[in-house]
């Protein structure tokens, strides 16, 4: 699913965010990327979604070499990759239903198809009863569920979650992680970026640890040890 070879990202004039990273993530894996603040986790996410370009090395996602991806091709890539963030990034003047629908509208889908998909993903995240509420009427966990639903509308092969529980309490965080595992069980590859030691260790899945841009540990059933 993901192939990185000798990946390096240097921000001018000389800040090394990612250094010589080589790794593979197989289709259907659930992988946690961990490390202390500034270790390169968020830069790696930006590289995978083509928000940043590598200084050196190679990035292949789903067989597509995106190392030198053209700007016009980025929207096509983004349909194959679902991304959720710590701050939800919902449109405040749109309801939960409208936030999800908007992601399909901008891609030119027909209204009948859009409404069907939106109802499906709302059901998946257990938010059908909250469909017509605005973000400020929803709890933090519910807002993150809307964000997850929005990320799934294009049926992505890869879901990247960048600190998805950073603003949530422990119980709600567990619910969000359970939902990510459910999505993974359907066959979607999940890449979880997290600093939450308890969440990562309870998953008992593969853990890749970054430190100053380097991969210092890659364990099949690892733990967050830093």
Image (cartoon, rainbow, N blue to C red):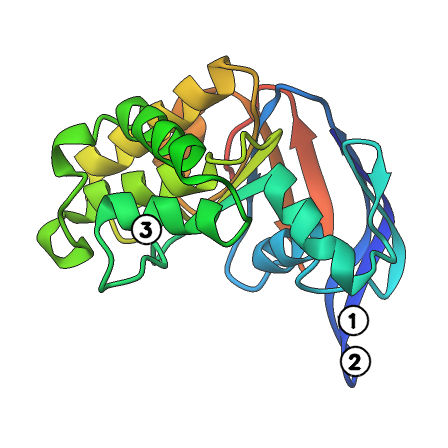
Disc 2 vs disc 3: which is toward the camera?
A: 3
- Which of the two residues, 134 or 11, is positioned nearer the viewer here? 134
Q: Would residue 104 be found to the left or right of residue 15 on screen?
A: left
Instruction: Tell me the tag on residue 10.
Output: 1
In this figure, which residue is indicated by the disc labeled 3? 99
Q: Is residue 183 above or below residue 80?
A: above
N-terminal label among 2 and 3: 2
Q: Is residue 92 above or below residue 102?
A: below
Find out whether the residues at labels 2 and 3 contact each other: C-beta distance under 8 Å: no
**Residue 159 position within the rendered picture, expressed as x and y whole percent measured from the top left:** 54, 36
Find out whether the residues at labels 2 and 1 contact each other: C-beta distance under 8 Å: yes
N-terminal label among 3 and 1: 1
Quadrant location of the N terminus?
top right
Q: Would residue 3 be found to the left or right of residue 89 on screen?
A: right
Q: Is residue 51 above or below residue 152?
A: below
Q: Residue at x 64, y 20 (%)?
A: 220
Q: Is residue 3 visible?
A: yes
**Residue 36 position within the rendered picture, expressed as x and y whole percent measured from the top left:** 52, 55
- Crowd class of label 1 (few under 14; some 14 to 19; many from 20; radius 10 Å): some
SS for dot 2: loop
SS for dot 1: strand
- Crowd class of label 3 (few under 14; some 14 to 19; many from 20; radius 10 Å): many
SS for dot 3: helix
In this figure, which residue is indicated by the disc labeled 2? 14
Q: Residue at x 21, y 36 (%)?
A: 172
- Which of the two residues, 5 or 28, is positioned nearer the viewer here? 28
Q: Residue at x 19, y 55 (%)?
A: 135
């Amino acid at each position: 699913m993901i192939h990185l070879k000798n990946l390096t990202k240097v921000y001018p004039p000389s800040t090394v965010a990612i250094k010589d990273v080589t790794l593979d993530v197989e289709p259907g894996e659930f992988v946690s990327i961990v490390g202390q603040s500034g270790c390169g986790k968020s830069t790696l996410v930006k590289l995978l979604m083509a928000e940043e370009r590598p200084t050196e090395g190679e990035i292949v996602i789903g067989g597509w070499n995106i190392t030198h991806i053209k700007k016009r091709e980025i929207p096509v890539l983004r349909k194959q990759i679902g991304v959720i963030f710590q701050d939800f990034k919902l449109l405040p003047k749109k309801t939960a239903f409208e936030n999800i629908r908007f992601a399909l509208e901008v891609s030119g889908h027909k209204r009948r198809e859009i409404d069907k998909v939106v109802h499906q993903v709302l059901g998946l995240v257990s938010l059908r009863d909250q469909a017509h509420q605005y973000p400020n009427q929803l709890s933090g966990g519910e807002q993150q569920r809307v964000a997850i639903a929005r990320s799934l509308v294009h049926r992505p092969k890869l879901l990247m979650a960048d600190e998805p529980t950073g603003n949530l309490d422990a119980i709600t965080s567990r619910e969000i992680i359970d939902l990510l595992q459910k999505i993974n069980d359907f066959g979607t590859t999940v890449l979880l970026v997290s600093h939450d030691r308890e969440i990562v260790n309870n998953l008992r899945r593969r853990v890749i640890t970054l430190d100053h841009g380097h991969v210092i540990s890659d364990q099949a059933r690892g733990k967050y040890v830093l």
